[in-house]
Amino acid sequence: MKIIVVGAGIGGLRFAANAAAAGHDVSVFERAATIQAMRYPWHDDVSRTAFSRAGLDVPEGCFPKKNWSFVSPSGDIRRMYESLEESDISVPRPALNAMLAAACERAGAKLCFGINAEGAIVEDGAVKGVSASSERYAADLVVDSTGVGSPLKTGLDIDIADKSEIFYAYRGFHEKNPAPEPEHTNKVYLKHLGENGISWVITDGDVVDVLIGRLGGLDITTKERALAALKADNPVIGERIVTGGGIYKIPVRYPAARMTASGYAAIGDAAYMTIPMLGSGIASSLAAADMLFAIVNGASKEGKSVRETVSKENLWRYEVEFFTRIGAEHAGVDLMKRSVLKMPDEELSWLLNSKVLTNADICLLAKGKPIFITPASALQKVVSGMRRLPLLMKVNAMLMKSHRAIRVARSIPKEYDDGKINAWAEKLKAAVIGD
Ligand SMILES: Cc1cc2nc3c(=O)[nH]c(=O)nc-3n(C[C@H](O)[C@H](O)[C@H](O)COP(=O)(O)OP(=O)(O)OC[C@H]3O[C@@H](n4cnc5c(N)ncnc54)[C@H](O)[C@@H]3O)c2cc1C
């Protein structure tokens, strides 16, 4: 089968290596000129299990993530405590890219750099190839791994994220000033300056990792104001930017309710697979790549024709798998994120610093996992939150809605049926965003 993976995204590279190893004819079109020029020059947090589950080595240069300290809108700080074994690891992007690209080359996938895809070639709702760098390339299957700004969705019935569901983030690694070592090395400011988003300051060796993220857009004035506030609170942030320093986009919403069509499958940020609370998408992209491969390769091994293998009916099974194993929880977390951002600053500050949220709850939130309440923990929360019973009830209602969103997401039609899928997509949207 002829497969074109567009964009050497994390999931795209992983899928390309698997598919080439299984004997398919795979090309990866990447607009960057080289592996080194691809994506981001920094390190990112990934759960340890992401690599072991995929049977991959942990890339070179990884180190354990330190515990977060959450700064509430009132300025109070709550530190989370997690053992080193449970913590995420910080993974250097260039090493991860190089590792995944090397696996592609070993398996015989062709990595084509400097090719910019302009769009998918669509005939009767099915994708037949890609237009790229003014040429037309035919393919049986196009895997869209171009990230949040995918140019391949035009003419297809695939979800497009609203601007308000995208995090616009400044990320710069600043030189460290010769100031005293901060007490909290990994600070994340929730609803920083009362705005719709977060900021963080991470002091790592001799650089300070600064992120200022806002939903829906980040103009220069807002960025400069937030940076000045962070500098005033964190004298370690130096002027000179060592690396990064741009404004980047991250989808922070539940996964696309339609991420496949005949001859087409989106993966990673193109399908909004990031954890909505945090914007972390490396682990789910790797997992999704293996799910897509299992569906595509399974069909070939069962003797299905190429046409049947890439049909919307077969590729739908990939989406079902993703939603069942990962995406449904993201829907619940998306609802929590939307509710938390709507909370008055005073309520959020109280909640974060009260015993209503246990250390275990905070650790779950820091990993972008939904919170589940057992009868025992409910009792403990009621006792801790007695003074603010109305707020506690509000939080309880939010958690109930979050669990409902997860249940709705899990009720994804297991077989392809346009009418049922449309009804489910509407129900899911209403469950997460409201009518
Ligand atoms: C500031 C920031 C911090 C983050 N922190 C974390 C973190 O700590 N942990 C984590 O798990 N995730 C993090 N993420 C998210 C993570 O980067 C993504 O979820 C993950 O990389 C999956 O994205 P992707 O590979 O699908 O897309 P991308 O990383 O966007 O890659 C898309 C690729 O496609 C190429 N491309 C795009 N358009 C075209 C085109 N038209 N033609 C050809 N090629 C094209 C691009 O050059 C790029 O190489 C962060 C993202 C940002 C921006």
Image: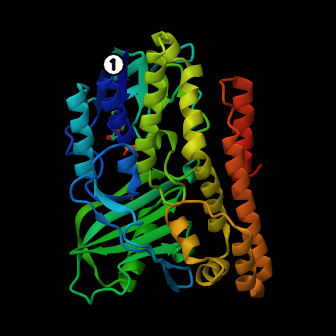
Query: At 57% across and 45% down in the image, what residue appears?
Result: 327
Q: Secondary structure at mark 1?
A: loop
Report whether residue 431 is seen.
Answer: yes
- Kindly identify the residue that appears in the image at 53 percent across and 53 percent down: 252
In the displayed structure, 222 sits above or below 103; it is: below
Q: Quadrant of residue 319?
A: top right
Instruction: From the image, tell me which residue sits under label 1.
Output: 24
Residue 4 position (above or below residue 97): above
Residue shown at 39%/39% (left/top)? 11
In this view of the protein, can residue 197 be seen by the observer?
A: no
Residue 360 lies, in percent from the top left, at: 56, 72
Of residue 160 and residue 64, the one placed in the foreground of this image is 64
The residue drawn where x is 27% and y is 58% is 42
Give the percent coordinates (x, y) of residue 27: 29, 24
Assess disc 1: are there few (<14), some (14-19) or many (≥20) residues with their C-alpha within 10 Å of its C-alpha: some
Q: Is residue 41 left or right of residue 349?
A: left
Residue located farthest toward the bottom when viewing the structure as drawn:
180
Q: Position of residue 255 (x, y in %)?
A: 56, 43
Amino acid identity at mark 1: His
Q: Nearer the viewer, residue 373 or 234?
A: 373
Question: Is 1 drawn above or below residue 405 in the view shown?
Answer: above
244 relative to 353 in the view: left or right: left
Q: Quadrant of the N terminus?
A: top left
